[in-house]
Image (cartoon, rainbow, N blue to C red):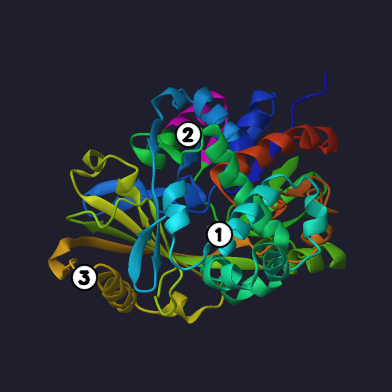
Amino acid sequence: MPQPQSWAILGGGILGMTVALRLAQHGQRVTLYESSKELGGLASAWQLGDITWDRHYHVTLLSDSHNRSLLRELGLEQELNWVETKTGFYTGGRMVSMSNSLEFLKFPPINLIDKARLALTIVHASRINNWRALEQIPVEEWLRKWSGRNTTDKIWLPLLRAKLGANYTKASAAFIWATIGRMYAARRSGLKKEMFGYVPGGYARILARMQDVLQRAGVTIRLNSRVTAIRKSDNGVAVKFADGSAITADQAIFTGPSSTAADLCPELTPDELRLHRGIEYQGIICASLLLKRPLTPFYVTNITDSGLPFTAVIEMTALVDPKQFGGKHLIYLPKYVPVDDPMFQAPDAEIQTTFFTALKKMHPLLTDDGLLAFKLSRVRQVFVIPTLNYSKKLPPVRTSIPGLHILNSAHIVNGTLNVNDSVQLAERSIPRLLTEAPRPKAAYAPA
């Protein structure tokens, strides 16, 4: 039997953690390196006022089979609380519910014919298997064909702009296909109801359990380990860190953004560098608010009116029992932006004023003293823009540097970047990683 190899997993998000666990379970010697002081990446938790909860909003769908399987392995799936949620729209300066078939029929922005075409679009998309053909069609062109001009202008384009900004013009129809597919599967699994789930304690609890399982599986965890360079070595892959330390591992898997991979790995071939630098990312400014009182019964309020500084309102306590937050109410206000958006440099106080003023416009009964806490998360590279013919531009996981693999969210082809897709990517990549990994010339040698 071949001797186990040493693997350095560079990046401690959900993808890196899952890869590390599976490799260790296959008998490999694994060290997981994370640049921050805690594991989790985009799924990490933080302190907001006097509560600890997810830094970004996350839910589990009934159809999220990969995430649910991992939670089962962690002993947490049976603790999932399933809740039927409602969806709202802020349109024409007022709140409108669209949480069931009757409300859909009454939905004011579009007429009955438009609604019929919208429903047909969703059903048609849910039955498409050949997503490669959709990659060749601009998303707006495809939506106008199936939903018509009025529905596209009043419903689809505001939602696309909310997620992609001006970059929606670069996206293919595969993006909306993937989005519809996940939500349609969730409703099908939920007997036509929108059922979302959460683990009490949120991702802080999930990640703590995951860290414990990793360590019991033999994974060594190194936090505060920011990578500064990845190069070839006679003995494997040489990795340097910001604190001046260095390692050499038989195999290394970098799980960060492709643009970062290109910066850290100058010895990649010109073609590899071109492919990684060609991956375009969308960023996010996400505000978390603790309020004294609830705003609506809606888990998500989609915004079709222009002029608001955020792109949706996520009312987490329409899903999570407010007892989890000491009776307070948790709200997320996300704004998806280009990686170079000026808002990344704006003072927190300025964004707080802008966001809260707009939220009070939407909810006139909300007052300044109703805000208990406000905190901002800024991430420049959150998810990849699914450009035309995206799958043909994807960099390979195995690189020209012997032993180096670059596996990241860019490899979630036509997904929507959620925990389930990240776990699925990790699971399906393990067999190939183990098969394609070249045999080492020497054992692991920390410097």
Q: Residue 295, percent across and down? A: 25, 58
| Viewer-side label of 1, 3 | 1
Q: Nearer the viewer, mark 3 or mark 2?
A: 3
Q: Secondary structure at mark 1?
A: helix
User: From where the camera sits, is residue 224 visible?
Assistant: no
Instruction: Find out whether residue 336 is within the magenta segment.
Output: no
- Say if mark 1 contacts mark 2, CB within 8 Å: no
Write down the residue under mark 3.
364
The residue nearer to you, when weighing 124 against 84, is: 124
Q: Residues within 10 Å of mark 3 (few under 14, many from 20)?
A: few
Using the numbered discs, state the Cα–Cα distance from disc 1 to disc 2 in whole angstroms: 47 Å
Q: Of callouts 1 and 3, which one flags the residue occurring earlier in the amino acid sequence? A: 1
What is the span of residues highlighted in magenta in the rendered image? 209-221
Q: Callout 1: 10 Å neighbours few (<14), some, many (20+)?
A: some
Is residue 335 toward the left or the right of residue 412 in the image? Answer: left
Dot 3 amino acid type? Pro
Residue picked out by circle 2 = 211
Residue at left offset 74%, top offset 41%: 251
Label 3 vs label 2: CA separation?
Answer: 44 Å
User: In which quarter of the view is residue 323 placed?
Assistant: top left
Which residue is most to the front? 112
Residue in the picture at 43% in, 35% down? 206
Q: Is residue 218 magenta?
A: yes
Which residue does the numbered mark 1 point to in the structure image?
A: 115
Give whichever of 413, 211 is nearer the camera. Answer: 413
Q: Residue at x 77, y 48 (%)?
A: 404
Q: Is residue 68 left or right of residue 298?
A: right
Res 258 quadrant in image: bottom right
Left or right of 38: which side holds 143?
A: right
